[in-house]
Amino acid sequence: MRKLRDQIIMLTVAAAALLAYTVVRFVWLVSTGIGGPLTFSDFLFLLGILAAVGGCVWGIVRDAKRMLRGTRTSRAIIWTFREIHTTDSDGDPTTHDKYTIRLEHGGELEFDKLPAYGRNARLMETPGTHIILRWIEGTDVIDLIEPDPAFRPPMPYDVIEERKNDGKTDYTITRRMATLEEHNRRLAHLPRTPYGAPVMPVAAWGAPNASGAVMAETNTAAATNAETAAGKEHKDALDDAKTRYAVLFNPPTLTFLCGLFILIPYQLWTMSPYGVERVLQNAVVFVAALVFAVWMLIHMAVQGAGLAADDLYRHEPKAVRATMLRRNIVRHCIGVAVFLVIGLVGLSGVSGTLHRGPVTEPVTFSSLAYHTETDSDGDDTDYTDFTFTDASGKDIGISVESVDDAYVLHQIGNRTGRGLILTYWDLGGGTYVYDHASPDASTE
């Protein structure tokens, strides 16, 4: 249930962020002298963003309906467990699990992962284990799963393990419940006591003790083993929480990242190569880093609240639960710090340029040249190089892609030696951005 609530919150944040971007982008495009006219491609892209917002709203409504229906609780049994071994595109081995659960009143459910750890993990991989399951129908969200105390754990002779080769390297191991015939055949091969009861292996049930000394030694060993088992359960609980409450590799965050990766190139592609828009191009990636840092903060608050109240860990000691939460916060804070530093350091240079503002001064149009650059993919891009000389003799070189040079040539012409009043932006490091120019009446 908390997972759905968290998804609703994060989808709401994503929808609000997309709507805010849409409003700002629309105002930017239709503003006089900055965004220019609203083109057909811009209109289509804004419709695409609104469609994404609609998808978020649809997800919010769907999850809200599921929450209103609530969870369903049923007794069930682990029916089959499959380990599917394959290889990825690089030839590296990969493994994923598949659990089939049969419900008490009929019907089957399939899950790729169960929220179980410690001693319960092995039971959940053993067909014939009776469980109590609480889940949200129509989803893979399990709110509670634990062994049913009314039934004994399955015995070794209750389970059949089969292997099926699906290729040279791919294979599937399936564990299933033994049929009645298989059960009786296995049971018949176990050694018997004088009273006819089957004798289980010593490793499974423990050996009888002949003396008090042996009993004391066994009790000590049992206590040590219990302590070790408890420590392993706590460690497995921490690992389970780390997996279930992933910081980056969770659907809402990955969806948000994909949205940023789509919006950033579009924003850069549609911005003007001149004036303040060209200056702001250098800020787009760093603003996105700050936006993601804010997302991480919100995600930390939402996910941390869910982790702190998760019923799956209610049996864990307070110290273990505190460690889970602390580790989750630390992992989020590392991400927040990294993206915050990237954003702030990157924006410092842009903010300095904006603070200084554009430079306007009389210059002489001294040269016009062309050159071609080849990128790592072998694609060529043609550039037009404009050079202006100010009153002190300093050269101001501005390069623009040749497909965009008509804007500059329309204002300054192609005749060198002409006097102009030039407005430009100094990005530092000898990089200048053209804003606009007009003829210098005093030199005409």
Image: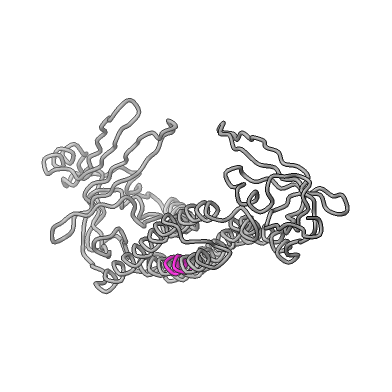
Residue 319 appears at what percent x and percent y? 53, 67
Residue placed most toward the observer, 189 or 45: 45
Q: Is residue 95 left or right of residue 351?
A: left
Whole-percent x, y for residue 24 in the image: 51, 68
Q: Residue furthest top?
A: 168
Give the position of the C terminus as an image quadrant: bottom right
Q: Which residues are magenta?
A: 13-20
Q: Is residue 17 magenta?
A: yes
Residue 29 visible in the displayed image: yes
Which residue reaches farthest left?
181
Residue 412 in percent (x, y) is at: 69, 51
Check the picture and name the quadrant holding the N terminus. bottom left
Asked whether 425 or 323 is in front, the reply is 425
What secondary structure prevails in the magenta region?
Answer: helix
Q: Of 275 and 422, which appears nearest the observer? A: 422
Q: Where is residue 116, by image quadrant? A: bottom left
Position of 216 with respect to 83 (left or right) is right
The coloring applied to the image is: one colour
Q: Is residue 435 above or below residue 397?
A: below
Up/down of 153 relative to 179, above or below: below
Where residue 68 sits, quadrant-wise, is: bottom left
Residue 90 lies within the magenta run: no
Of residue 62 and residue 47, the one placed in the foreground of this image is 47
